[in-house]
Amino acid sequence: MAETEGERKSTSDAARERAALRDMVPAVVLLIVVQGSLLLLDPDGGASTANVVWSLLPMVPALWLVWAQLRSLRRADELQRIVQLEAMSIGFGATLLLALLGGLLDAAGIGDPRQSLQITFIGGMLAWLGALGVAAARAR
Amino acid sequence: MARRARRGGSTSPVRNRLRELRAVRGWSQADLADRLDVSRQTVNALERDRYDPSLPLAFKIAAVFGERIEALFFPSEEPVGRS
């Protein structure tokens, strides 16, 4: 069975990857620029409208990334879609558990809620990406 | 008909002749994936009986091979080489 188990991507897979990159790269670049600007220019920390807008600016590239992810999900073939949705459900479950953990610790007066929020976000993302990586490795 | 891919070997009650028919035509998994508009990994999962396709994909597979669906997919107790 010569070359039948080759590692070449299918044409549709390559097209899906190119489209995902086209959608996501500008959003990631914008996120880096906005986040970098926030760090460098350091908003004053007051409750002014300008400060609120300035502080929430990273939401623009974040929403762009969510939109890109949804488009990627719609482009995926049926097995890829199941794998991606399963990975997202694992990430969602991990996020809920970490949020509950942070809430319980906060109620007990332990730890910093800001840190708990960061851990919840990062932990949920890692669980999602980890589940995706395991599923992708298994499918090879 | 669609079923999630499972780890390990085949445990599906439904088997298929994709690998055999693909080999006869000398196609790679990627070649077949191109014809079906799916990823190579999906073809791999189908051939290993780790994933049962949706009905639309099953019809597409049947059309690509010029066979009827029941000639491609069958219960695992039936012999693999039938036509």
Image (spheres, coloured by chain):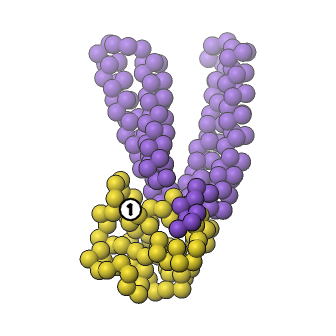
Pick whichever, A43 or A89, lies toward us. A89
Q: Name the colour assigned to chain B in the rendering.
A: yellow
Pick whichever, A140 or A17, lies toward us. A140
x and y percent of residue A86 in the render?
A: 42, 50
x and y percent of residue A134 in the render?
A: 44, 44
x and y percent of residue A100 in the render?
A: 33, 29
Q: Residue at x 52, y 73 (%)?
A: B23
Pick whichever, B19 or A46, lies toward us. B19
- The chain letter for the residue carrying disc 1 is B
Q: Can residue B34 be seen?
A: yes
Q: Name the colour assigned to chain A in the rendering.
A: purple
Q: Residue at x 34, y 33 (%)?
A: A97
Q: Quadrant of residue A42?
A: top right
Q: Which residue is mark 1?
A: B50
For the residue marked with disc 1, what is the amino acid?
A: Arg
B80 relative to A109, above or below: below
Locate residue B33 relative to residue A40 in the image: left or right. Answer: left
Q: Quadrant of residue B29?
A: bottom right
Q: Residue at x 42, y 21 (%)?
A: A116
B56 relative to A68, above or below: below
